[in-house]
Image: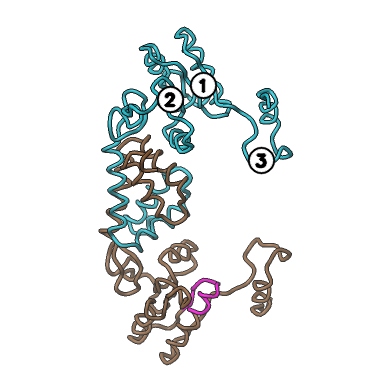
Chain colours: A cyan, B brown
Amino acid sequence: MSQILAEPIARLIEEFGKLPGVGPKTAQRLTFYLLRRPAEEAHALAQAIVDVKEQIIFCHVCFNLSATDPCQFCADTNRDHTRICVVEEPLDILALDRTGSYKGVYHVLHGSFSPMEGVLEDDLKIRELAERVGQGGVQEVILATNATVEGEATANLVKMRLQDSGVHVTRLAQGLPIGSDLEYADDYTLSRALEGRRDY
Amino acid sequence: MSQILAEPIARLIEEFGKLPGVGPKTAQRLTFYLLRRPAEEAHALAQAIVDVKEQIIFCHVCFNLSATDPCQFCADTNRDHTRICVVEEPLDILALDRTGSYKGVYHVLHGSFSPMEGVLEDDLKIRELAERVGQGGVQEVILATNATVEGEATANLVKMRLQDSGVHVTRLAQGLPIGSDLEYADDYTLSRALEGRRDY
């Protein structure tokens, strides 16, 4: 391919191809798209990539990705700092906060416990969470890891590590998603929905 | 979203979202992927974007995108310069040359005739092709525009503009793709395959 294509073109196709979910065809399409666009547009993308790596840091309190330390959530005195919602990834904060139903603070584990994929306990920010809780003032830790095998294992692990702290540990409800048909629900979801049934 | 996300993150999501086929969710995924990767990897992508815009130019002969002018095809004396294959986009050259079945040179129109979408004859490199053919030495012009309505219209237009030059104009064969089932072929393809049938 590099013989047919000019080196800078082949290189950009290769770089785009390293992104997740971007195959060779998509990488080609993106490259030739940028070649057709004004230089300013391509430079804006390049600059945004450089900026995000140079300006974004970890919040030392909750390990969210942020341009400031502490991050906007940890620095916000209007939020409820007695409640910590534990998530796997920074993107999960986006999803939770968009609901407007949660006004506490967060803690990002940066992954889920998955020995099969080489992610062990020390790779996650669990010890940091235990230390944070240990400093006192926290009433509830909400485990908002994914409803997957790894997410469940992670929730279990975090719960175990917080056992001695005496903090109240809760887990997001599992059951039928809103708008879904019972007929099409999978067995696991239906079992969880039954187990978790509430007075009505 | 910009209130929940740090500005550099929100900006990169926005920039990625401008790329074709990249929706808000994909743009988020790409952004957080780069945030997790080493800085060198992100910078390599940013640099490749800058380089492609700064180093890639049009070949003044065939209007292919290239790091050199004339491009490698036009500069290659081993290729057959009496045959010009006319394509819509530079990517089409990649597809054709990969076959190894063509050893002539190319001409990139940079689009297809589509008045509905505002692409008129003057937006395409048709006049430049006529001038190139007019300089003599060309025996065959192969129309390799897409087998779509626009590609067909473009092929017709180019043929008309080359009529006075006396050059031999051909069009890529249309018919059943190799490995396809007759049963699943659409009516248009089947009609073309019948019209274009050959002695066997």
x 50%, y 14%: residue: A168
In the image, farthest residue toward the top: A164
Name the front one of labels 1 and 3: 3
> Which is more N-terminal, label 2 or label 3?
2
**Closer to us: B140 or B77:** B140
Q: Give the side of residue A37 with respect to residue A97, left or right.
A: left
* Residue B195 position (above or below residue A170): below
Q: Which mark is residue A109?
A: 2
Q: Which residue is mark 3?
A: A180
Q: Is residue A118 above or below residue B60?
A: above
Q: Quadrant of residue A197?
A: top right
User: Residue A54: where, in percent of width, then height?
Assistant: 26, 38
Magenta stretch holds residue B147: yes
Give the numbered dot on residue A154.
Answer: 1
Q: Residue at x 49, y 10 (%)?
A: A163
CB-based contact (under 8 Å), mark 3 and mark 2: no
Q: Are marks 3 and 2 on the same chain?
A: yes
In the rendered image, the quadrant that contains the C terminus of chain A is: top right
Q: Are marks 1 and 3 on the same chain?
A: yes
Q: Position of residue A12 (x, y in %)?
A: 35, 52
Q: Which residues are magenta?
A: B142-154
Mark 3: secondary structure? loop
For residue A169: magenta?
A: no
Where B17 falls versus B172 (above or below)? above
Task: Report in which chain the residue with disc 2 lies.
Answer: A
C-alpha gap between disc 1 and disc 3: 27 Å
